[in-house]
Structures are given as structure tokens and as C-alpha cells.
Amino acid sequence: MVTFFACLALLIIGFFTYGKIVESVFRPDERLTPCTAHPDGVDYVPMKPWRAFLIQLLNIAGLGPIFGALSGAIWGPVVYLWIVLGTIFAGAVHDYLCGMLSERNNGASISEIVGIYLGPFMKTLMRVFSVILLLGVGVVFMVGPAGLLALLTPSTLSVRFWTIVVLVYYFLATMLPIDKIIGKLYPLFGICLIVMALGIGGATVLHDTTRPMMELTFENLRPDGAPIWPLMFITVACGAISGFHATQSPMIARCMTSEKQGRNIFYGAMVTEGIIALIWASAGIAFYYNPAHGMGALLDLGGGNSTVVYEMSMNLLGPIGGALAMIGVIACPITSGDTAFRSARLTISDWFKIDQKDMKKRLALSAPLLVAGYFISMLDYQVVWRYFSWANQTLAMIVLWTGAVYLCRYVSKNASLMAAIPAAFMSAVSMTYILYAPEGLNLGASGYTILTYVIGLIFALILASIYIVRVYIPAGKNDRRLDHHTA
């Protein structure tokens, strides 16, 4: 229990200390924001800071900090370190930079931002990659809540039925102005999210005598022996760092009324998500661990993460409390899935310069995306989740390198290291994983585990070297910081 509360304290302290440092480096000012400069009543809609924060939190806090944290908990308490350090020094920095860079570029989608700072080739690559990722996210966050709803309702209402119901809601949320459905429903979903987190966290602490919360150990407790590196760093995606957030932050960048709201909205929402992941990871560790048999409940229970969430909620909180917790868990992915499809629409509209004030044009983009999502949902959910997790961290890597380039060119060379270091780390994670994992080259099963580590490290060093030679060193010779940063 001591480890849990220490990690919780570190996350809160990180927001008030490192978050302040990141903000002071970026130097937000009083310039007009996109929604105050040209509101359109659809996507560029001024919002109060508390509402913008809540929407940002619900956009990014899908099933990742719950399912990902529960899966990561099988490795044992070592998962705490990745959640805490990843959130403070990588995930929250990533979210703040991509949100603020969007704000400074007229609310542009992340693919357009990457193109501005990394060039036209990366812009094209990111446009395609972002749309594919967002479709995957939408599917993951469509099938996940549908499976949970099926557990809570009569057997006559199948997962396929609930998938269609969720899909209809997604269609409306994708099409209508952001303040009509998302702005109205998210406060209610926010209450569910808070009740869920407090309920599970409080019950885990109260049940410490019967289901003890383990203290920190670096031992790999996973029964099947799957290595911590790189698997845990991909599995626990949204609870530490997630490239998906880079696709969501521009939506709120279009609704901010002041740049100075950025730290609370972007850095703060990521820290809050880290707290949610910490709660579920600690509950998972306590739920899985049996002194006589070790870890493994998630591996033993049929039905995967949905079944584990259901069993944990009912065991810890009873039927009524468990049902409330499940509603909170269902709300999380729904509030990320709807904005995933919405963000895909915005990415394509930015790509082809399609004005979104016209309802017919929004319909022309939204309908094909939702139809494609429905057919993808028929694929194996676990396979889609694994590819989603890898794509998540790969996108985070690209966005961090983009942030490093911006900071190096327009702030200072030393400041850029706060993005470049986690970017290099995530580069090693992403490359090693795709070489090691079954959905990649599957070299881990062929006995080449060490080789995947070496190639992953070399890949990170190559990208770091390119950054140093092409960006870091030239930055001191051609200083363009002041004019862009005050533009």
C-alpha cells in the first residue's frame, strides 16, 4: 500500500513541478486562440476551461488506462514505475506539446503539425497512419464497451446488438457540433468516471487485509515469463504515453480561449489518466496475486479484460457498486471512441481542405468511416488491440520527435531534450516490439530476443543521431526562435 500512495503522490507532485517547467519552456501568451479568432459553431467553439479539461480527459481516457493497466499488472508492481515516470516525463509532455502546437497552428490536426516541422513526406505518412490508427481506436472502443454492456444486460442483447447501438451514437457525435452531444453528455460521463476510479481505488485499499496490495519489486511475476521489455511498455499505452492523444488534443486546442489553460487541460488530463491507470494496476495486482499460486487471474479467466473488470468490480464493490463501476468503465471507451471517429473526420478534412460547416460534407466523410469501423469490428478484438497498442506508441514516438524539433528551433537546444530523450526511448520500444511480437516479425519466439533488443537500440541511436546532425547542431547557427514564438 505504501508503494501505491507514494506513486500517487509522485504523479500529483509531477503536475505541479515538472508540468510547470514544461509550461515555462513553451511560454504561453495572450495571443488569440483559434476559436476566438474564427469560431465556426461546429469544431471551433469556445469552451470554459473546466469543460475543455473534462472533454480532453474523457477523450484520452478510453479502455487504455483500464485494460492496458490490468494487462500490465500481470508483470507485478514494476508496472507502477512505467505509469509514474512515463506519465510525468513522456506522456504529459507529449500531450502538452501536441496540444499547444496545434493551438499555435490554427487548431491543425496532428498530421499537419508533423508536416510543418518534419517535412512533406512525414505529413503524407502521418495523414494515412493517423486515419488508420483512429479507425483502429474507434473499433477497439466500440467493441470493448459493447462487450461490457452485454455482461450487464439480458443474454438476448448480444455484443453485436450493443456494437450497433454504440455505432449509432458515434455517428451522431462525429457529425454534430462539438457542443451539442459531446459538450452536453461529457459532464455526466465525467461523474461516472470519477465514481468508478474512487470506488475501485477505495475498495482496493479497504480490502488490503484480504487482497493485499503488493509493494514495489523489480521481479517479473508474469506466469508465462513474457519479458518486461518491450512488452509492458507497449501493453500499458494510454496509462503512461499514447500517440492517440495527439489525435485528440487538436480538437480541444480548437476550443481553448487562452493559451495559459494548456497546462491544466493537456498536462493535467494526462496526469489524471495516469492516476486512473495506477488505480486499476494496483487493483489488478491485488486481484491477481495469490501467495500460493502467484500471478495470473487475467490469464486464467475466460473472456479477457472485460471478464476481469466485471469480476473485480462485483467482488470489490458488490452488485450495486460494481454496476456503477462498470458504467464508469463503459463511459471511458465510449467517450474516446466517438472522438476517434470525429478526429478521423477532421484529419481527412484538413488533408483535402474540405469545409466542415456544411452538414452534407460532414456526412460524406463520417458515413464511410463508421461503415469501415463496423466491418473492422468483426475481426479478432485481441489482434486489433495489439496492433492499436503498437501504433499508439509509434505515433507517440513521431510526435515527440516533432516536439523536439520545435523546441530546438524556436525555444532552445537544451529545452528540446525534454522531448528528444523520451522520443529516443519510445523509438527503441516501438522497434523492439514489432521485431519481437507475434504480430510483427515474431523473432522472440525464434530465439532472437537479444537481437531485437540490439536492433531496437540501434534504431533509437540512428534517429537520435539524425536529430543531432540535422536539427540540434544547426539550431545554434540559424536562430529563428523569437520571431516564431511570438508570432
Image (cartoon, helix red, strand yellow):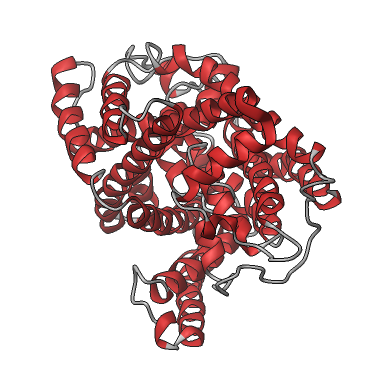
> Is residue 131 left or right of 293 when viewed as pictured?
left
> Is residue 176 left or right of 449 when viewed as pictured?
left
Above or below, comparing residue 332 to residue 224 in the picture? above
Locate residue 267: give its quadrant: top right
Total numbered badges shown on the rendered structure: 0
> Is residue 313 left or right of 355 when viewed as pictured?
right
Name the residue rendered at 58%, 60% in the picture: 422
Name the residue rendered at 46%, 74% in the picture: 432
Name the residue rendered at 57%, 22% in the picture: 192
Residue nearer the viewer, 210 or 305: 210
Residue 375 in sight in this render: yes
Name the residue rendered at 46%, 27% in the picture: 252
Residue 85 x %, y %: 68, 55
Residue 92 x %, y %: 60, 44
Residue 210 x %, y %: 80, 46
Above or below, comparing residue 181 to residue 377 in the picture? above
> Is residue 81 left or right of 56 when viewed as pictured?
right
Residue 466 x %, y %: 44, 72
Residue 477 in sight in this render: no
Residue nearer the viewer, 41 or 242: 242
